[in-house]
Amino acid sequence: MTAPLLALGIFVAVFAIASMRQVHLGILMFAAACGVGLSLAGMPLRDIVGGFPLSIMMLLVGVTYFFAIAQANGTVDALIKGVLSRVGHNTSILPFVFFALAGGVASMGSGMAGLVVAPIGLPIARRSGMDPMLMALAIGCGISAGAFAPTSLFGIVSYGTARQANIDLNPLVLFGVAVAANVGLLIAALFIFGGRSLRVRRAHLPGSPARPDDASPVVNAPFGLYQLATIACMIGLIVAVLTCAMNGIEPDIGVMTFALGALLALVDPASGKVALSKIDWSTVLLVGGIVTFVGVLQTMGAVDLLGELASTVSTPIVSALVICTLGALVSAFASTTGILAALVPLALPLVASGHVAGWALISALAVCASIVDVSPYSTVGATLIASAHEEERVRMTSLLTRWGMCMVVLGPVVLVGTLVLPSRF
C-alpha cells in the first residue's frame, strides 16, 4: 500500500512543481512516470513507455494537420463566412448550434466522433467575436451528452455494465440525465463566457474590419479546386465516421485525418508544407506525459486502492460522493470508457446494501466521469485546444483546467444531491 500512495503523492507534486517552475508539465510528467515505474513499480522501461497514448497522438496530429491544410488553402475561411452569413448578428445561437452538432455526431456510435466539429467551431468563434472557451465548452458538453445515447459508447458501457451486475438502469434515463446535466453546464458557460460579449463583439462579423492578429487567409475564389477537394474530404470524413459507428466499428479519426491530410498534401503541396508548422506538439506531449503516468498508477493498483478506500466509508451518501469524485478525478486524466468499466463494479457493494438506488448512483457516476473530459489532459480537451488559434491556447489550457477541476468537485455534489439523495426516500 505504501508504494501506490507514494506514487500518488509524486503525481500531485509534479503538478505543483511544473506550475511553480513553469516547466512543460507533459515533459516533467513523462520523466517522473519513468522514474516511478522503474523504482516503485518494478516495471520494465518498455512497458512504461508503452503506456504513451499513441492513439491520442495520432488523433491530435492527424486532426490538426488535416484542418491546418483546410485553413491554409482558404476552405475554413470560406466555411466560416458561410455559417456567419446565415447566423447574421444573432451569434448567441452559435453555442447551441454546435452543442447540437457535436451531440448528434457523438450519439452515433462514438463520443469521440463529435470532435470532427471542433476544428470548424473554434475558428468560427474567433471570427464571430465569441469567447473560444464558450465554443469549446459547447462542443465538449455536446459530446458528453451525445455519448450517453443508447447507440453510443459511454451509454452502452454504462448501462451494459450495470445490467451485468443486475442493476436495472434504463438507457433512456441515463441519456436524459446526461443531456440535462450538459445543457445546464452550457447555460452556465453562456453566462460566464458569453452574454454581453456576444453583442459587443459584433464588429468582427463579416463586412467589418478583420482583427489585426487574424492570420486566416482570405481568398477571392473560396470554392476553387483546392477548396472543393477539401470540402469533399471533410464530407468524406463525416460519412466515414458515421458509417463505422452504425456498423459497430470504433472509428479511428486520427488515421482517417492522416490519410485525408496526405491526399490533400498531394493535391496542394504548398498548403501541406504550411500545415506542418501548425501541428500542436505541445498538447501532444502534455497529454502523453500525464496519461503515461496514470498508466503506471493503474499498474501499481493506485486507482483500485482509492476505490476500495471509498467503499469503506460507512455513510452511504458520503460513500457515493467519494466514488463519484474519484471517478471524475481519474477520468480527467485517463480514458473515460476505462474508468466507467472499472468503477461501476466498485459501486456494487453500496448498491447491494440497499441504501441507494442503483440507477441513480450509476447515472451520477457515469456523468461525473464524462463532464470532466474538457480537461486539457483528456482527448476531448486536448483536441479543443489544438483546434483553437495559437494565441488562444495558453489561456484555454488554463481555463479548461480550472473548469475540469471544478467539475471534479461540483459534478459529484450536484448529481449525488439531485439523483442519489432523493432516491433514498
Image (cartoon, helix red, strand yellow):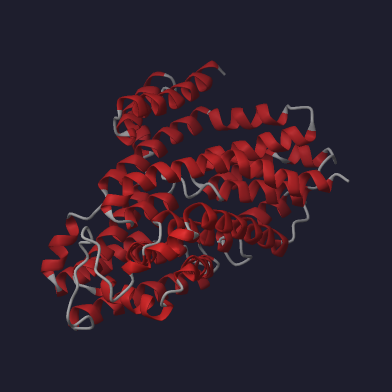
Residue drawn at 15 percent across, 67 percent down: 271
Q: Quadrant of residue 83?
A: bottom left
Residue 116 locus on image (x, y percent): 40, 65
Residue 133 locus on image (x, y percent): 43, 54
Name of the residue lying farthest toward the right: 425
Q: Quadrant of residue 282?
A: top left
Residue drawn at 35 percent across, 56 percent down: 59
Relative to 215, 98 lies left or right: right
Which of the two residues, 388 or 3, is positioned nearer the viewer here? 388
Q: Quadrant of residue 67?
A: bottom left
Q: Is residue 333 something one can see in this rendering?
A: no
Q: Quadrant of the N terminus?
A: top right
- Vertical position of residue 55 compared to residue 13: above or below: below
Residue drawn at 79 percent across, 34 percent down: 316
Residue 261 locus on image (x, y percent): 24, 66
Residue drawn at 56 percent across, 64 percent down: 146
Residue 243 locus on image (x, y percent): 46, 74
